Amino acid sequence: MTTTYVLDHPEKGRIEYRDRKRYLWMSSLFMPLFPMLGIFLYFAFDTQWALAIPLLFSYFVIPLLDYVIGADENNPPEEIVPQLEEDRYYRLLTWFTIPMHFIVLIAIAWFVGTQPLTVWSVLVLAITAGSYSGLGINTAHELGHKKPEFERLLAKIVLAVPTYGHFCIEHNRGHHKDVATPEDPASSRMGESIYKFVLREIPGAFRRGWAVEKERLARQNKSVWSVHNDILQSFAISAVLQGGLIIAFGWIMLPFLALHNFWAWFQLTSANYIEHYGLLREKEASGRYERCQPHHSWNANYIFSNLVLFHLERHSDHHANPTRRYQSLRNFDGLPQLPNGYYGMYLLAYIPWLWYRVMDRRLLELPHIQGDLSKVNIDPDQRDAIVRKYGQQQTTAVPA
């Protein structure tokens, strides 16, 4: 039964709203379980080729579904948003997703540790598990921005699966402060390949997260090396989880978990890369950057991938209003728009020359840029080449 939200507005009269995707949001709940399909098909047909199906689904089928099904640019009425945000159904979906990530990693680790698999099958399963554990970082992203302590605790717990316990601290107090500036290691620059970006983003994010947490604890006269450190709390859960898998299933877990963890981190890197590529907040006369606006993030309204990612792709509204829950995020006219959903854009980013060919012109044609390279966040190593290519001498100085 579809829930109808109703409000009698003093000026606009009776406002009614139904979320047509209400029950489709369950896709985000079941998406983390999809790797189990490969294992089921392996036992059903006795072929290791079946193990690659969840990976192929993510990187090839989902982009095709986004293309075929298309986008949804509709927004809930702003007057209804308070009711929509108070609807417990939506937050329960994020809560119930948490155990799915633990179940899937343990199940795949059991499968790797007990079945006679080829090296290639182990590699495929590690990447598959990492890809879907990367969804756990996305769930933490949704929960970690919320005010209730319980939801922030759940975020800390799910980040233990990919051993990325510093994420919420770094993201909320670092990335959201510095986004779309040269100072942000999690904002990619024009001309910067994803392979160069990952070397800057992963270590830079950890350093910033640790520094922010150290500063927080210092204000409370507490040691960074203590039980009060939120990062260490999450890492402790990781140690128990992954240490237990190594004890249970042996040495094969060492390369499996190493690749699993890296690929989960790389999914976040991939998202960060496409979300702010080349976008730059202007510096005001005071030396501070302007407030983050919706046009400082790349947006996507593709229905299927948004359903399985808790609306992550409406990233423009998220950065402008980070505490909004996923069901309330809005589309705006004139936003930087990606030509496909996230999984399709990941594939594009993994082929740098193709990424530049598609995205660089799209970046420069944005209404607030209009070819002005001084309004673009440019990789300093590529600045001269970009100026030669696009024929403009004025560029923004970017620290190396």
Image (spheres, helix red, strand yellow):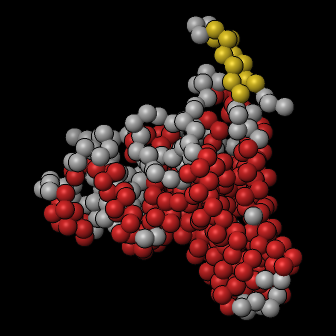
| Residue 184 image offset from top left, x and y in percent | 39, 58
| Residue 360 image offset from top left, x and y in percent | 32, 57
Outermost residue, front direction? 68
Q: At 51% from the left edge and 36% from the top edge, which residue is drawn? A: 331
Q: Is 240 left or right of 147, judged from the image as shown?
A: right
Count of numbered badges drawn on the protein: 0
| Residue 69 image offset from top left, x and y in percent | 61, 46
Q: Is residue 367 something that shows in the picture?
A: yes
Against 188, residue 109 (above or below) is: below
Quarter where residue 293 is shown? top left
Against 55, residue 22 (above or below) is: above
Q: Quadrant of the N terminus?
A: top right
Q: Who is closer to the viewer here, 150 or 277?
A: 277
| Residue 216 image offset from top left, x and y in percent | 53, 56
Q: At 77% from the left edge and 37% from the top edge, which residue is drawn? A: 88
Q: At 22% from the left edge and 40% from the top edge, which residue is drawn? A: 285
Q: Who is closer to the viewer here, 112 or 337?
A: 337
Q: Is 108 left or right of 364, judged from the image as shown?
A: right
Q: Is 226 left or right of 116, judged from the image as shown?
A: left
Outermost residue, right direction? 44
Q: Is residue 240 something that shows in the picture?
A: no
